Image: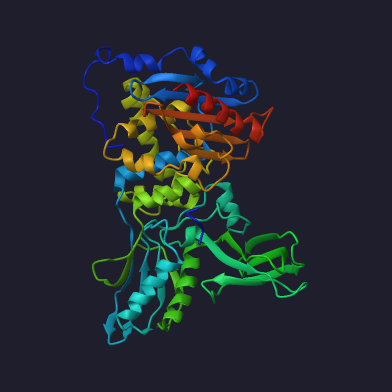
Amino acid sequence: MLPPPLTNYKPLNKPLTKLIPIAFALLAINTGAASQTLPGLRNLAQNADVSALVVRLSDMQTLAALNPRERLTPASTSKLFTAAKALRTFGPNHKFITRLTTQGRVTDTTVRGNLNLIGSGDPTLNTRDLQHLAQRLRARGIQRVTGDLVINAGHFGQIPCLTPDRCEAADKSAHSYDAPLSAAGINFGTLHATVYPGPQRGDRTRVVLHPIGLAGYAIDNHSTTQKAGSHPHLRVWRTTDKDQTVLHLRGRLPTDGQPIEIHRSVANAERETALALNRIMADAGVRIDGVARVTQQQSRADDAVTLARVRSRTLQTQLNRMLAYSNNYLADTLTLDIAAAQGQTPPLTLEQAAQSLERLGRNARQRVYGPEAGKSAPRLASGSGLSVRNNMSARDLVALLTAMYRDSALFPAFYGSMPVPKFSPHDMLKQSNLDFLTRITAKTGTLTEPVSARALAGYFRTKNNGFVAYAVLINGTAQNPHPGFNNTVAVYESDLERLLANH
């Protein structure tokens, strides 16, 4: 399995002229002067598009700003909107429930009818959860199902791919970030395999799919075992056509090397769940007389009997994984969950579901900047940021961060979900000084097409333990489409280090 990797505010009723206090005035501070505290980004803006804003939240004083209203591609900083809206919709302790049901009769050790897995949109449903369901079914004494094993994904319905990455991954993928979405997907929409070196030089490596014995895949393995101490190199991709799905492997592993864990996006998330659960049922001693299949029709709960259920991790735990590992499947599944909870009718589309995130952005701007600001909103076509149609400014992000800071009930969960660089699972932000490593929380964002996009947003603590909200977005241009690492990450790290030293 992959590592996981606002309370609604009351509208303003008084005339605007009576409500323009110092908070709004300070946000309109001369950004030319404020940009002097961002020398690296100011220099970078000569060859890239940059939007940046840093605001002290105790008095809404702008500490630094550079083109704060310019809307750019935000990449995975979009996930901050998903996290905030999910907390407002479900609360931090919410758990998703996945059930095994039947509309048939249960007699002695037999289910006479179909056995249905009812997907609830749990973004972290995994193989182990399916094993728990099978074990609980077996603990009831069930040994046989006379009908089919049916995976019900009707909670969302059939979801169109929309983004080029996910559409292309239906045929071929060498990644895990482009997994298809489903209300009944497992393992973040990926196939899990382990590759072991052979016992001797020249031997083929050994490939094990999980769960062990998983059907539905052909293995095209041309990876070999090399001498001890040699450098491992492995390329793995999955292809799918109408007749067959194949996992391809090329490369080499040393005889003394460690096994390599592989995760690749599947072509069809519900099909993967059907294949895995069918295997798991057999391993648990439950015989399925029929076939394993998928339906997109919504389940009828009125005449179904629940035979087993499993609860997800809490939403707050899921958000921690989503933000720390920047998991696209988790973020976009939560976006669809929010839409379903708000009553949108299946089949859902991600772009339609993301409209609730746009409304959140509009409300945050209105609450923080005043009623006129609410006439404009960031553009979100996905909750993950994988879509290049997402479009927002540093000001939009800081408005969201400010609104969540003011939400005393949800801020602890929101703030606690964001990684601190020192303890992040990734190394990208770990080359900075101690203040940067320990005093900030940071959500990063990266895209490479059609131009490079890098972003960073979150909070930092001042020396007197106050809170500052910050956001930086950097996009390449037609003339300079791909600014390098040192021209983006190193630059915003340096400017933030300077701010940390002074506040």
Quarter holding residue 95? bottom left
Q: Residue 368, position in %: x, y?
A: 34, 25
41 vs 59, left or right, is right
Q: Residue 24, position in %: x, y?
A: 34, 17
Q: Residue 71, position in %: x, y?
A: 50, 27
Report whether residue 56 is seen: yes
Counting every numbered tag in the picture gives 0
Nearest the eye: 306 or 432: 432
Nearest the eye: 355 or 409: 409
181 vs 19, left or right, is right
Q: Determine the residue positioned at 46% across, 64% down.
A: 270
Report whether residue 440 is seen: no
Position above or below: 422 against 40:
below
- Residue lying farthest to the left in this orientation: 13
Q: Determine the residue positioned at 43% across, 42% down.
A: 418
Position above or below: 19 against 102:
above
Nearest the eye: 33 or 75: 33
Nearest the eye: 244 or 135: 135
Q: Determine the residue positioned at 36% across, 57% down.
A: 313
Position above or below: 362 against 265:
above
Please identify the quadrant where the C terminus is shown: top left
Quarter holding residue 302? bottom left
Position above or below: 300 against 412:
below
- Residue lying farthest to the bottom in this orientation: 108
Q: Residue 370, position in %: x, y?
A: 32, 21
